[in-house]
Amino acid sequence: MKQFDFGIIGFGIAGLSVAYALRKSEIFRGASICVISGGEGLPPPASHTPIALLNPATGREAKLVRDAAEVLPYTKHMLREIQDWAFGNTLNMNTMDLFEAPFFFETGVLRPAASPEMANAIKHRLETDPWPNDWASWLSSSEIADRFAGVYNAHGGLWISEGGFVNMTRFFEVARKWLEVEGVVVEDRVLGDGVHDIHDGHNLEQKTLGELTFRRLILTAGHGMTSLSLWQPDELGLHAVKGQILTLELSEAINLSCAVSMHGYLAPHVDGIQSSRSARKITIGSTFEHQFDSIQPNENGQRRLLEIAESILPGIGSNIIRTENWASIRVHRPPDRKPFVARQYSERGIWGLTGFGSKGLLLAPTAARRLVTELEEQDRATLS
């Protein structure tokens, strides 16, 4: 049997964030950790999207997310640390193919208003929400035209200088290597039908999965949480939403230096060490499908995403030479849609961390840190 202090089921942004927080913990810094990634028992993580925005504004009115002044800097700190580590270790690790380009782009996010009414609503939020100094400002139509040629600008828009975007494919490749160097075991394995193999042994503090044994188990599998044998499907109250994403290859490069959010979002693919204003490939997301029969991409999703692209970059349709579709399932818990920790089995050393919806990149790292702080306090109480 392989014994670990912590097992983490799921290697999306929540699972990665928990492993990162454990490695940064004074108490658990030396703990043995195993992350179970993928397999037929879990759906693909929603956070393994090609591109994800780091955007503290949400909804039609660009409402500032709760605890933005805490969650955004912490996520950026995690991204910078792993990216800086990658570049610092490239030559020593002979992994130039993996680390030759960045994954985190602190370009800002532009939020054009789609109508006069939306412009007024966003302006009101800018004035009344607790935006930290210098995080956001309003740009007029002419200012957008001057700074972001080709982007829809009829009614002005919100400029979020602290925002950005992440190439999630590249990020998870690098982050996995970072975890392994930190001594975290990452295993790709088939879990079968959920995690029915997990059970209490003779010692109630031990959880087993095949030949793996854990003292504590943290479940971060998102939509896969509802299929785990530990919970009834409706016990967590999770609502599933299908999101489709579309990557476009363009016949001619366009000048796009930042991510844009309107009706959906759009971001360039950037290659090389230096961020360039010129992009031959862009990614558009995302649909919000509350009713669906399949997790596969479909024509309706592609049509909707092309409409989003055209609304943000008028005339882009004539520049497309190839498309690539992607889809996954994300979850939130109505009505407040706040991420949450499932503690129903915490006395057995089992927790769940889920419910991030479309804001996993922004919210999961801080939520994971808070969970690890809770576990630290439990250990201190036990020792006192």
Image: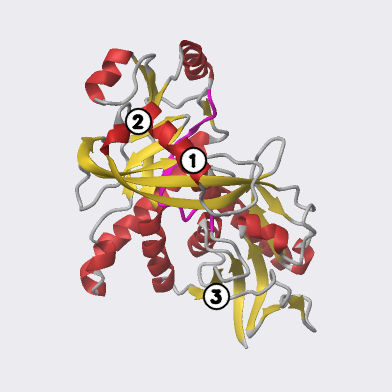
- Please tell me which of labels 1 and 3 falls first in the chain: 3
Q: Which residue is mark 1?
A: 286
Query: Please, what is the three-letter code of the amino acid marked with disc 1?
Result: Ser
Please, what secondary structure does the residue beneath circle 1 have? loop
Q: Position of residue 226 (x, y in %)?
A: 71, 58
Q: Disc 1 and disc 2: Cα gap in Å?
A: 22 Å
- Residue at 49% x, 15% y is 127
Q: Which residue is mark 2?
A: 161
- Residue at 58% x, 51% y is 329
Within 10 Å of the Cα at label 1, are there few (<14), some (14-19), or many (20+) other Cα atoms? many
Within 10 Å of the Cα at label 3, are there few (<14), some (14-19), or many (20+) other Cα atoms? some
Is residue 50 highlighted in magenta? yes
Q: Nearer the viewer, residue 85 or 321?
A: 321
- Please tell me which of labels 1 and 2 falls first in the chain: 2
Q: Which residue is mark 3?
A: 32
286 to the left or right of 209: left
- Which label lies toward us, 1 or 3? 1
Query: Please, what is the three-letter code of the amino acid marked with disc 2?
Result: Ser
Q: Which image quarter holds the C terminus?
A: bottom right
- Please tell me which of labels 2 and 3 falls first in the chain: 3
Q: Which residues are magenta?
A: 45-60
Above or below, comparing residue 28 to residue 330 in the picture: below
Please, what secondary structure does the residue beneath circle 2 have? loop
- The part of the image, by quadrant, that contains residue 194 is bottom right
Q: Nearer the viewer, residue 244 or 235?
A: 244
Above or below, comparing residue 87 to residue 142 in the picture: below
Q: Which mark is residue 193?
A: none
